[in-house]
Image: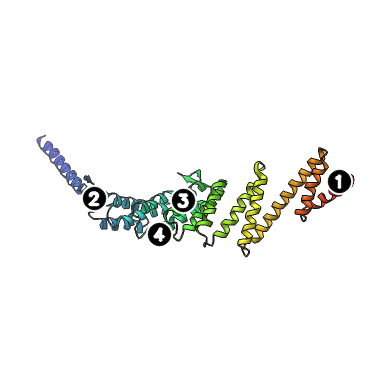
Amino acid sequence: MKKRKLLYISALITIIMFMASVSEAFWVWTPQTGKWLNPKYSVKDTPMLQLEWAMKYFKNGDFKRARAEFEKLVKYFSDATEAPEAQYHVGLCYEKTGNPYKAFQEYQKVVDIYPNSEYFDEVIKREYEIGDRMLTEDKRKIAGLALFSAADTAVEVFKKVAENAPYGAYGDKAQYKLAVAYTKMYEWEQARDAFEKVITDYPESDLADDAKLQLAVISFKASKNASYEKEATDEALNEYDEFLKKYPESSERDKAEGAIGELLEKKAESSYKSAQFYERIKKPRSAIIYYEDIANNYPSSQWADKARARLEILKAWKD
């Protein structure tokens, strides 16, 4: 009995000593965190070692683990020369794992915290590309569900790009795409302001002439709203006319001329309806004014022949 008891005690001591040795092997004190940590998950002694450790996972395609290691570097060595590179790679890891919006947010930290970093230009490029992708999507997904308009997010991204580097390689492009994003949201006033900013801030940009055209397109679309049809129609005509005068060789010339033709048809139709109204209430003189407006100012419209026919009848009756 005593022998068996001694065996039990000996086995228990052996187990305790083994567990102690295992515990000692897997838990160490780290001055960076001020905690006991498993070496597998602890912070390395220097930012360079931590960066190399994170890059090992990144190069092997383990972007989730790599991101965690890059985040440790930024957290515990935020002032190190390696920190901007680590922060950039946090964003890159999110991009690699299909989370572009989170990637944008992490890239923006490079701009906000490390504006003099060598990664600044690359971050601006990647932010712009993220916004561009969002502009072609219908919804932004969260946890696999399409919950938010991607155009809303594109607006946020392009605003930041234009703000971060207004006169950089993507300044004019971001400002233009910001305006396009607003048009996708039917936010016409914001779109107009954004297109006008392209024209005023980037007059030498290749996008300036198209921005001018888009102003006319916005007014053209607004002209279809009956509540302010005449005002918007006249505004669209003026803007198309200015566009053609300023950019006579534009590749969009045919589209602009087509839109002008449609707008003139609308004005002719409006005058014809007014003339018909005055005929119905027995005011032929007023009707004649509108019919003559069509015949003189819109002679090529589909309403011109009808107007001339009514003029002959009304003038004959008047005589």
In the image, which is nearer the foreground, mark 4 or mark 2? 4
Instruction: Measure how far apart labels 3 and 4 are at the Cα level.
Output: 17 Å
Instruction: Measure how far apart labels 2 and 3 are at the Cα level.
Output: 43 Å
Task: Find residue 53 and report its horizontal and vertical position in percent.
Answer: 29, 56
In the image, which is nearer the foreground, mark 1 or mark 3? 1
In the image, which is nearer the foreground, mark 2 or mark 3? 3
User: Contact, CB < 8 Å: mark 4 with mark 2?
Assistant: no
Q: Mark 3 points at which residue?
A: 159
Residue positioned most to the bottom = 249
* Residue drawn where x is 74% and y is 49% of the image: 268
Mark 1 residue element = helix
The foreground one among 108 and 165 is 165
Q: Which of the 4 image quarters holds residue 17?
A: top left
User: In the rendered image, is residue 137 in sight?
Assistant: no
* Residue drawn where x is 20% and y is 45% of the image: 23
Q: Mark 2 points at which residue?
A: 39
Residue positioned most to the left = 2
Rate crowding at label 3 as few (under 14), some (14 to 19) or many (20 or more) other CA atoms within 10 Å: many
Picture layout, residue 165 above or below residue 280: below
Q: What residue type is labelled 3?
A: Lys
Q: Which amino acid does label 4 sit on?
A: Glu
* On-image quarter of the N terminus: top left
Task: Find residue 29 and report its horizontal and vertical position in percent.
Answer: 19, 47
Instruction: Measure how far apart labels 4 and 1 are at the Cα level.
Output: 72 Å
Mark 2 residue element = helix
Q: Mark 1 points at which residue?
A: 314
In the image, which is nearer the foreground, mark 4 or mark 1? 1
Q: Mark 4 points at which residue?
A: 122
Rate crowding at label 2 as few (under 14), some (14 to 19) or many (20 or more) other CA atoms within 10 Å: some
Mark 3 residue element = helix
